[in-house]
Image: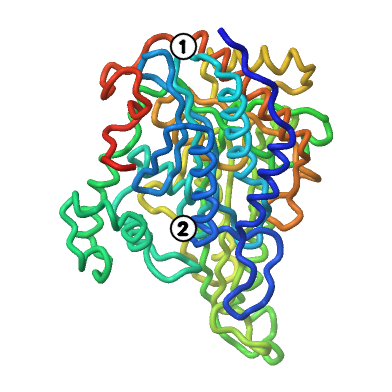
Amino acid sequence: MVQPLQINRQYISDLIGKFSDFSRKKDDSGNALRGTTRLAYSDEEKAAACFLRNEFKRMGLYSPRDFAGNMYGIRKGDGRPSAILTGSHLDTVWEGGNYDGAVGVVCALAVMDSLQRSNAKTKNAIAAVGWRGEESVSFGFPYVGASAALDFIDTEKLLREHKFISGTLLSRLTRLNKNRLGDFGFSYDEIYNAQSNEQLAGKFLKALQSMQLLVQNLSAYLEVHIEQGPVLEKEGMLSAVSAISGNYRFTVNFLGEADHSGAMPMNYRMDAGFAAAELALEFERLAASMNSPDDHQKLRELRISPVEMKTVQGGPTTVAWNMQVSFDVRSCENEKLAAFRQKAAGIADAIAARRGVSIKISPKTPNSPIEESVSLGHPLISSIQEEVLSARGASRIFMPSGAGHDAKLFAKAGVPTGMYFIPCKDGRSHRPDEFSSTDDILVGAEVLQETIMKLDECTPRNGSDAISAGKPSCIFKSVPEGI
């Protein structure tokens, strides 16, 4: 087998610089934006996706775009219908950084570049992807592109409004696919003039489903990502990811009485503001009580953040009577999330009763309040990761992820899944000063390539339901003409 060439460090540096260009420069009021703003299905994300596709084409890869706008670059294997897929997301949060997501796309591109330059032969097809809309900031739910590719999306999500740009997810996807939808019975008015509704969303789901991934044909999904925490920078090495945390997100609403803040004695008040403040501190204590020293050492502790606190219809001389506090609770142990939810409700009720206010707890997703964690402990992938990292002298072979990633959906879908974290400066992420060095990204690309090649050697034949063995399109249910 021809061995791939060394990863091109200069290409990685050039790519990071290029992706930084795809960023919104000003807000709607004309104020300059800091960092990188490349929101889901924005013009900036579209430009990044087009650049990615052009890179795939330049390398001579088969480069389809699915109906969610995800960009793929695929090189053939030896004739079997299975593929190893790698990549990450193209979007960012508002005034975020240029490394969250982009690092994984850059590593995938660097590996494909190496394989193509060396004309490396592989058993599996090797595919790179840039996912659209991983961040939840735009539509209120994460992993938009990966959800569409893996059939984890529904009409309710398609009808959600973009938080920063006019229109629904459905309207943006309809325009994105305007030249394809005639084959699925869409009229001109439905593409260009129709209001988003459930019937149209159901119709579009059929188009999405036509080009979803055949998970049985995926030998593995691999993703490189910045850690978004400080551990690896302090230890000077990258790590594999053992699990991706679940979460419980909810809002607590306290209703008290609106009284004059100077005239009403404190012991007569029904103060929603102090109830909310006490609740936040009690929840912090509860989280601490549920974590052991071993949890901290292994980075598996339950974590809680009060992500938003606001008063409704208050004023500078009015006792806070309507307070909302939203929390984000994370853990890699689903039992802990369930236990926290139960104990937190009791604490909130006790505070409300003691302070004479009413209370309502509203999960962000009422039908499934807890998003469960997933394990990435696939035996073959984990053994290869341990081999690869041990050879590099890594001190921490595995660590859990407190943040969510597209890889989580692949693990849920039953695809053998692996991730690598690389260091980021001071652990900062989702802010303008987010940074990872070119050398650290280079190491990420090198271990990704090494893992792909070792996996390829070990992967058995797969994918009996493929369209046609040996064709790059075999990872999709079907591929429309001309894409």
Location of the N terminus by quadrant is top right
Q: Nearer the viewer, residue 54 or 136?
A: 54
Q: Residue 459 carries which label?
A: 1
Q: Which of marks 2 and 1 is nearer the N terminus?
A: 2
Amino acid type for the residue under numbered disc 1: Thr
- Per the image, the residue denoted by label 2 is 41
Give the secondary structure at mark 2.
loop
Q: Which residue is drawn at 63% across and 87% down?
A: 315
- Whole-number angstrom distance, CA of label 2 to CA of label 1: 35 Å
Q: Which of 98 and 245 is in front in this view?
A: 98
Amino acid type for the residue under numbered disc 2: Tyr
Question: Residue 187 vs residue 133: left or right?
Answer: left
Q: Which residue is drawn at 50% across and 25% down?
A: 417
Question: Residue 356 vs residue 209: left or right?
Answer: right
Pointers 2 and 1 in contact (CB under 8 A)?
Answer: no
Q: Which colour scheme is used?
A: rainbow
In the picture shown, does residue 102 fall above or below 126?
below
Q: Which of 373 and 145 is in front in this view?
A: 145
Location of the C terminus by quadrant is top left
Give the secondary structure at mark 1.
loop
Picture coordinates of residue 276 (x, y %)? 62, 66
Question: Residue 13 vs residue 449: left or right?
Answer: right
